[in-house]
Amino acid sequence: MTVPHPVQPTMILLIEDHDDLREALACALEVEGHAVVTARDGNEGLHLLAEGLEPRMIILDLMMPGRDGWSFRAEQTADARWAEIPTILYSGAAINQAAVRALGVRGYAAKPDVDGLLKLVALVAAG
């Protein structure tokens, strides 16, 4: 008889400036079995990465005060340590598929509607 090994949760860095939405998203992802570390903006997200956080995925809002998602993504892709971390956009910014491709992300889900949340959870599950 083999003893199953516990599955290591996927570590996700969630970068979102709205407190209530950040907490709700973190909770939803934790229910799905993921470990979630949150940041309020791109500066805080970059600081966590620089301090050694090694997420398996990043969920990124685009429109934030301080360092926005576009600026964060430019810094992320410029640094070899973080460039390959799969990133998903979850934003209220209306962007098209060309912009998604230009940012080099895995996908985009619109917030704050329920369909966007369900799409986000599906994108995370797909890896």
Image (tube, rainbow, N blue to C red):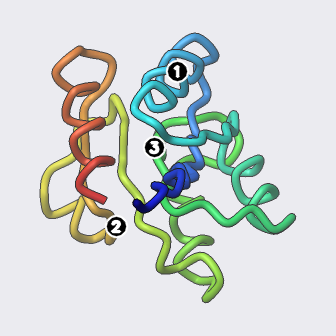
Q: Which residue is mark 1?
A: 27
Q: Position of residue 58 (x, y in %)?
A: 50, 54
Q: Is residue 79 left or right of residue 89?
A: right
User: Quarter of the image holding residue 55?
Assistant: bottom right
Q: Nearer the viewer, mark 1 or mark 3?
A: 1
Residue type indicated by callout 3: Leu
Q: Is residue 50 above or below residue 78?
A: above
Outermost residue, right side? 51
- Count residues near mark 1 (Cα–Cα under 10 Å), then give few for <14, some for 14-19, many for 20+: some
Residue type indicated by callout 1: Cys
Q: Give SS at disc 3.
A: loop
Outermost residue, bottom side? 80
Q: Is residue 123 above or below residue 17?
A: below
Q: Earlier in the sequence, mark 2 or mark 3?
A: 3
Q: Quadrant of the N terminus?
A: bottom left
Q: Position of residue 9 (x, y in %)?
A: 53, 49
Q: Which residue is mark 3?
A: 62
- Count residues near mark 2 (Cα–Cα under 10 Å), then give few for <14, some for 14-19, many for 20+: some
Q: Give SS at disc 1.
A: helix
Q: Is residue 19 left or right of residue 99?
A: right
Q: Is residue 88 left or right of residue 96?
A: right
Residue shown at 24% from the left, 60% from the top: 100
Label 1–label 3 contact, CB within 8 A: no
Q: Which mark is residue 103?
A: 2
Residue shown at 24% from the left, 15% from the top: 113
